[in-house]
Image (cartoon, coloured by chain):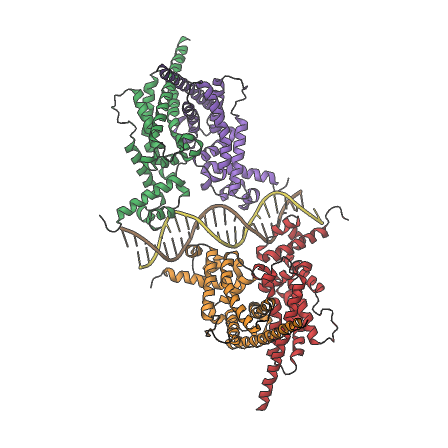
Chain colours: A red, B orange, C purple, D green, E yellow, F brown
Amino acid sequence: MAIRKDGIESSEKLLKAAMEVFAEKGYRKATVAQICHKAGSNVAAVNYHYGSKDGLYIAVWKNAFEEAMKVYPPDGSLPSDAPAEQKLRALIFSNLHRILDDGRLGCSGQILLREMAEPTEVVRQIFHDVIAPLRERTHKIIRELLGPKASEQDIRFCVLSVVNQCLAMGFRKSRKKLSPFFRADDIKKDVIDQLAEHVTAFSLAGIAAIKKESESKKLQLNRY
Amino acid sequence: MAIRKDGIESSEKLLKAAMEVFAEKGYRKATVAQICHKAGSNVAAVNYHYGSKDGLYIAVWKNAFEEAMKVYPPDGSLPSDAPAEQKLRALIFSNLHRILDDGRLGCSGQILLREMAEPTEVVRQIFHDVIAPLRERTHKIIRELLGPKASEQDIRFCVLSVVNQCLAMGFRKSRKKLSPFFRADDIKKDVIDQLAEHVTAFSLAGIAAIKKESESKKLQLNRY
Amino acid sequence: MAIRKDGIESSEKLLKAAMEVFAEKGYRKATVAQICHKAGSNVAAVNYHYGSKDGLYIAVWKNAFEEAMKVYPPDGSLPSDAPAEQKLRALIFSNLHRILDDGRLGCSGQILLREMAEPTEVVRQIFHDVIAPLRERTHKIIRELLGPKASEQDIRFCVLSVVNQCLAMGFRKSRKKLSPFFRADDIKKDVIDQLAEHVTAFSLAGIAAIKKESESKKLQLNRY
Amino acid sequence: MAIRKDGIESSEKLLKAAMEVFAEKGYRKATVAQICHKAGSNVAAVNYHYGSKDGLYIAVWKNAFEEAMKVYPPDGSLPSDAPAEQKLRALIFSNLHRILDDGRLGCSGQILLREMAEPTEVVRQIFHDVIAPLRERTHKIIRELLGPKASEQDIRFCVLSVVNQCLAMGFRKSRKKLSPFFRADDIKKDVIDQLAEHVTAFSLAGIAAIKKESESKKLQLNRY
DNA sequence: AATGAATGAGCCTTCATTCAT
DNA sequence: GATGAATGAAGGCTCATTCAT
């Protein structure tokens, strides 16, 4: 509608460009000049609209996360009384898509990954605020699956096992050449689905084994 | 006795300092000035001993990797005819210790991790050369565990599951505050051992489940 | 009115300062700091306006050459059917003024000279493109003066004789103390004119002698 | 004789290497590291043997000049009562060979040339001391050729004409591609001889013309 | 609202020189 | 006598930021 590029349009273009550049190069390697050039703006635009490079990065980050959460909610639109197995499955699907699906998410996943691998001071707090609930949700589901006899450490370890299987996928994406089935520019949606299915099956079996083990341990302890 | 330390000592101090700084800040954020200051040397020392910042980084990297491999060999000193389960267990122990054990390894693990999260042009090739054999070894073990009926994709997915459980642990270390049992400056050796035991049990169960599934799939296919 | 001079003014001041410093110190000895200081700018100004020290040098060079060619065109505004003697005279006047006249040309001549004595990689090509036509023009004139019987080598040697008489004058300028009549800061225009008159007379006589010689040589050859 | 490289040998190798490097790159562009590497010595060797880079350069320069003067003496071994024409011829031959003949002189000529084009502070005085006698000798010869009626300025101009024809040849050598007959790595001795013959003939004719002119001028002045 | 010009802090590197053996 | 190690001064360049319009 606007004949001239008004502020909103300009700052949005900046945000989009920044998202791409940050995703590709990381926070430090990316330069405001690159971003502004990509956005068709002047070098001063970043500071004008976002105060500083940091400001822009935070904006990008929040935006990326919100988008990711909107498109792939961690509960997978499941009713709250669904069985834990289904909840875990939804969680894994959500995680993997959030991390791997460039097609719909732009570079959100990559931005999040980078922040995880090399935490930037500027978003450390935000990051924590955002990750904690996810962790909490996962914790609850796994606790339910492990049953009442599992120790706190068993739960934590299983959380790690599940979450890490998803997280480290981000590594592969940035070096696609190493992993044959990640070679396509956009990893196909159905491959992600297959992967998620695998992780779910793998993890449920793993959790079941840990559960059994913990029960037999308790049993042993009870004997004496 | 000499006021001026001899070359070997000086370049080694430089290497050690670089290892720490690179591990803490990453390649780009680290400055040669910081490193030299930490090593008690002049700014020109890096250039004199290693040619350039890149040269120093490569030296650090190779050193870190060699050290890690020496202290925690991937075969865990197992005879080559050991059962696959034991081999997998050794591999997981080796991986996790390599990544998590600061106490004995300096920052080797962290350096390796960083390179994985944000590949540096300078060591890309070396990195690939070094990772490929590890991947190959893992692949073989898992193939053996899954049995002859498993599809190639099943194998790959299981490799990912196992390796990722270990890899992503590196994330935790850099942000210790998030993970309660990683809070100590040096993660205790026995915690790593427990974790490794967990990952082994979890993974063996996961692999077994995938194996069973693949066999039943084959069966189904045979029926028609 | 503006405290901050607008870009054109600033980059021009930079160009002027660079011209002086490059002329005085040569490419390598000149530092961007010196140039910027002289231009009243920040060290980063060179990079901002010209990309690099090289870029600035090339700009200076092109500017110097264009200016020199504009003020002292090699044809001396002579009609194209003027006699060869007059053309040679015009060429010599143009050459000498271009090289010696600081008053009107700034340091153009000196910059050109330096480039001739110690070719810089960055302007080698430009230099060649610029010198070749001049050489061609001189060649034609001398060929005309020498007549049809002169050998190609005779022509080349005479071109060298004429051109070198002019070129090497640049040496004197940089070490004014050695040559009494070059001592003034600006060599007086009339001294240059006298010098040019001398070189013209000297060279025409030299060429005539070579012509005569070549004709008698041919004659001798014809006899047998 | 010496089994190990004694000091003399070492410092001489250094001098030779320096001569080549200075000739090729010029004073500033040449680095002591390069020179020492070429001489097979340690970086500290230059300072040890010659005190500093400047010291080495001065040594090289003196050596080059002495060598050049020894091989091509400006009097061409002519008796002091030889006719002026022959003296001029000998001078021109000496000059041109000194400048152009790499074969016998190593890089002496080039070193001298460089110093002329871009005077180095360190040898300015030496240079002057060395050039002044040459200038004086040329001056005398030309004065004799021009006869008693020539003005001082006529003499100076003719000196310039003669000397410059020789000097500027040095330019050609560094950019051989521009001058077809300079293309060979070592300019052939007979080409230099031909060139010298040409310059002699050309100059004698030029001088004769100036002489005639000056006489007629005097005549004209006498009339009034 | 938006921008081209300009800045200053900081980084990596080069290089002649000095030190201690 | 000769050398490998080490240094400090300086140079060119990058980049986020600010200025004035």
Q: Position of residue A191 (x, y in %)?
A: 65, 64
Q: Is residue E2 above or below residue C205?
A: below
Out of A212 and C176, give the one closest to the viewer: A212
Q: Can I make out residue A52 in this image? A: no
Q: Quadrant of residue D171?
A: top left
Q: For the view shown, which residue lies furthest in the bottom direction?
A: A224
Rendered image quadrant of residue D64: top left
Q: Residue at x 70, y 73 (%)?
A: A86
Residue C147 in picture, x, y percent from top left: 44, 18
Image side of residue A77 versus residue B149, left or right = right
Q: Relative to the observer, which residue lies in front, E4 or A213?
A: A213
Q: Image check: D132 left or right of A107?
A: left
> Which of the image's four quarters has the C terminus of chain A?
bottom right
The image shows residue D206 at horizontal and vertical percentages of 39, 19
Point out residue B206 in the picture as x, y percentages from the top left corner. Answer: 60, 74
Number of marks in picture: 0
Q: In the image, is residue A215 above or below residue B124? A: below
From this viewpoint, which residue is outermost toward the right?
A1
Q: Give the residue at the far left of this rendering.
A: D1
**Quick check: can you spot residue B178?**
yes
> Does F13 sit left or right of A52 as displayed?
left
Where residue D159 sits, quadrant-wise, is top left
Residue occupying image coordinates x 48% and y 43%:
C31
